[in-house]
Image: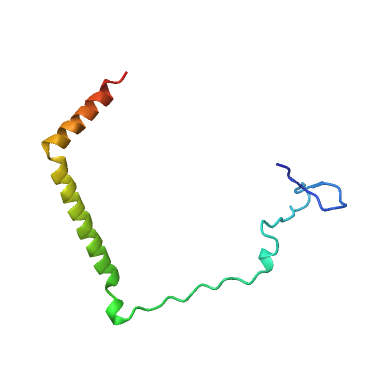
Amino acid sequence: MSLNYQTPGEAARPLRQDSEKADVLEIYPGASTAPRVKPRPRRRLIGSESGMATAEYAIATLAAVGFAGLLVFILRSDEVRGFLLNLIRTALALP
């Protein structure tokens, strides 16, 4: 990767020298002159939507608890317990 910038018909010159500032090279030419993107103003929630985030968190928490209960039920069965113990024994027995 070269640190020199060369325009047609001009000899290569270093980007930075001790006594002068470096030239600025744009990754996207013309981006500095493009109009800036204005951030959208925040929309206030209407009264019926004000508790939606809390309700969504509650539903996601209930789903996670239900899934965790299902996993506990499955992992307590003898077949799965034997499979996991066999898997751990073979993994520890490898040289």
Q: Quadrant of residue 48?
A: bottom left
**Could you tell me how many numbered marks the image carries?**
0
Q: Position of residue 87 (x, y in %)?
A: 23, 29
Which residue: 22% across, 58% down? 63
Query: Is 58 situated above or below 93?
Result: below
Query: Is 33 situated above or below 19?
Result: below
- Outermost residue to the top: 95
Q: Position of residue 62 (x, y in %)?
A: 20, 59
- Which quarter of the rendering shows the C terminus? top left
Left or right placement of residue 31 versus residue 73 in this view: right
- Outermost residue to the bottom: 47
Colour approach in the figure: rainbow
Which residue: 51% across, 72% down? 39
Left or right placement of residue 27 versus residue 48 in this view: right
Q: Position of residue 29 (x, y in %)?
A: 70, 61
Which residue: 82% across, 53% down? 7
- Outermost residue to the front: 79
- Which quarter of the rendering shows the N terminus? top right
Q: Quadrant of residue 90?
A: top left
Query: Is 63 situated above or below 56?
Result: above
Q: Position of residue 8 (x, y in %)?
A: 84, 53
Left or right placement of residue 2 versus residue 82 in this view: right
Which residue: 30% across, 21% down? 94
Q: Nearer the viewer, residue 58 or 20?
A: 58
